[in-house]
Amino acid sequence: MQKLLHMSKKNLAETIDPEKIPRHIAIIMDGNGRWAKMHGKARVFGHNNGVKSVRQITEAAAELGVEFLTLYAFSTENWNRPKFEVEALMLLLVETIKKEIEVLNKNNICLRTIGNIEGLPTLSRRALMKGIESTKNNTGLKLILALNYSGRDEILTMVRKIAQKIENKEITSAQLNETDIEANLYTAGMPAPELLIRTSGEYRLSNFLLWQVAYTEFYFSPIMWPDFNKDHFYEAILDYQSRERRFGKTSEQLQ
Ligand code: FPP
């Protein structure tokens, strides 16, 4: 049985077209709390188990040659959760980074963040900085954790930066273009995600990468994040590969 399961996993991965792997995949990891409740446990139990999925999906993305994997780990709205849960999430972040730095380095994975990192507790910030510093020369997958992240806040920050440049007469409003906007987002230098996955059967964007997802393909999975495994990830990529991305053109124009 174990062997059979292993084979089916391998086969699914083998059906993925290596020429059409998304360069950037973004994931809204949702359902930890409900998963914990289904198991008769506290919400934090779900977050702890969510880390296993983070590990599996990061590994799968690296194996497939995905260049950027962005995980929505903590939104600015998440501060409104019970104090205990917020503290547990921050602690989990610190512990996970400490534990995984070696694995990240072994797999040539480079850790990065997007979001208002200054607004995180000192301990989390320090662990993050250490993780980023120690993996910065890795040339494989870029693993980007969205932390204290809000898409609207990112846009507001970008507008402020550009307004300042206009005030300083470095640029005029007439010269401003989309490249200037992208250069002033947290994601500067990264391609937009081709695929965005949200787990747990919710159909929302929840303030994630608002500018960047203009032409992104969305994939919604009913699976709760702690149960989301490599096979589910492969299925999302296969679904993406079956779609026709038209960018406003007609099918005929693409041929
Ligand atoms: C959403 O589930 C999950 C989060 C807000 C946190 C995600 C965190 C992890 C997966 C673990 C830590 C991650 C890293 C990178 C160390 P939810 O709590 O909103 O679930 P619910 O919708 O069922 O309540």
Image: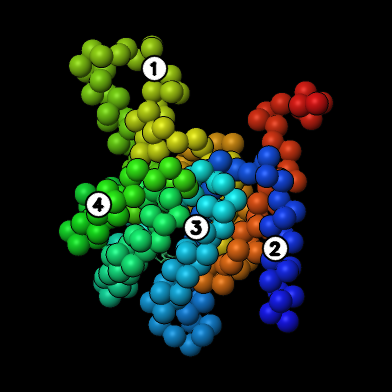
Residue in view at x 21 percent, y 49 percent: 118
Looking at the picture, which amino acid does disc 4 mark?
Met
Q: Nearer the viewer, mark 3 or mark 1?
A: 3
Question: Horizontal and vertical percent for residue 224?
Answer: 56, 70
Q: Nearer the viewer, residue 236 or 211?
A: 236
Residue in view at x 51 percent, y 77 percent: 35
Q: Secondary structure at mark 2?
A: helix
**Residue at disc 2, CB closer than 8 Å to ligand 1:** no
Residue under numbered circle 1: 176
Q: Earlier in the sequence, mark 4 or mark 3?
A: 3
Q: Earlier in the sequence, mark 1 or mark 4?
A: 4
Q: Quadrant of ligand 1?
A: bottom left
- How far, Cα to Cα, is label 4 from label 3? 19 Å
Residue in view at x 37 percent, y 50 percent: 111
Circle number at residue 10: 2
**Horizontal relation, residue 72 to residue 118: left or right:** right
Residue under numbered circle 4: 129
- How far, Cα to Cα, is label 3 from label 1? 36 Å
Question: Horizontal and vertical percent for residue 61?
Answer: 55, 53
Work out which residue is located at the far bottom of the displayed protein and give it: 40
Dot 1: within a 10 Å radius of its alpha carbon, few (fewer than 14), some, or many (20 or more) residues? few
Looking at the picture, which amino acid does disc 1 mark?
Leu
Q: Nearer the viewer, mark 4 or mark 2?
A: 2
Q: Earlier in the sequence, mark 3 or mark 1?
A: 3
Q: Nearer the viewer, mark 1 or mark 4?
A: 4
CB contact under 8 Å: marks 1 and 4 = no
Looking at the picture, which amino acid does disc 3 mark?
Thr
- The relative height of residue 84 versus residue 107 in the rendered view (above or below) is below
Q: Earlier in the sequence, mark 2 or mark 1?
A: 2
CB contact under 8 Å: marks 3 and 2 = no
Residue under numbered circle 3: 58
